[in-house]
Amino acid sequence: MNRPTRRDQLIAATAFVFVPTAAHAYIDPGSAGFIITSVLGFLAAGGYIVRGYWGRLKRRVFRSDRKTVADGDGSDSTDAHPDDGSAQG
């Protein structure tokens, strides 16, 4: 007797999932509202997470640009201005 191959197993699993069977179930309107609220909550949470990572990425990119510019021209934004009396001379 031959063993079923992966292809045969995949076809059997697909047929099992997509062949309709009689389902004697009832979904009330409250369940639909719960599902919609859950989906909207997941979308909002995903947007909040993306916003946080986007902010970190922006800070990292712009901070590295600022360091490169400061290292390249010899000036730094933290240097004291010579007219404010805090510069040593």
Image (tube, rainbow, N blue to C red):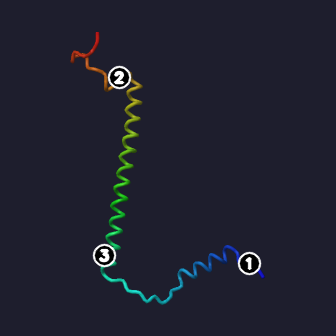
State the residue position of label 3: 33
Tag 1, which secondary structure? loop
Q: Earlier in the sequence, mark 1 or mark 3?
A: 1
Residue drawn at 71 percent across, 78 percent down:
4
On the image, the x and y values in percent for residue 81 come to: 26, 20
Tell me which residue sits at (74%, 78%) in the image.
Answer: 3
Residue lying furthest top in this view? Answer: 89
Q: Circle 3 sits in a helix, a strand or a loop, which is it?
A: helix
> Any mark on residue 3, and which?
1
Q: CA distance from mark 2 to mark 3?
A: 59 Å
Q: Quadrant of the C terminus?
A: top left
Question: In whole angstroms, how far apart are the C-alphas of marks 1 and 3?
Answer: 47 Å
Q: Quadrant of residue 37?
A: bottom left
Instruction: Name the disc covering residue 80, or none.
Output: none
Q: Position of residue 29 (x, y in %)?
A: 30, 81
Mark 3 residue type: Gly
Query: Looking at the picture, which amino acid does disc 2 mark?
Result: Ser
Of 35 and 71, nearer the camera is 35
Give the SS element for disc 2: loop
x, y percentage for residue 12? 62, 80
Q: Residues within 10 Å of mark 1 (few under 14, many from 20)?
A: few
Instruction: Residue at 38% x, 21% y: name it.
Output: 74
Snapshot quadrant of residue 88: top left
Estimate the spatial distance between the alpha carbons at disc 1 and disc 2, rounded to whole Å: 74 Å
Locate residue 64 relative to residue 33 in the image: left or right.
right
Residue type (three-letter) at the residue carrying disc 1: Arg
Reply above or below: 82 against 58.
above
Q: Nearer the viewer, mark 1 or mark 2?
A: 1
Q: What residue did someone put label 2 on? A: 75
Q: Earlier in the sequence, mark 1 or mark 2?
A: 1
Q: How many neighbours does mark 3 have within 10 angstroms: few (below 14), some (14-19), or many (20 or more)? A: few
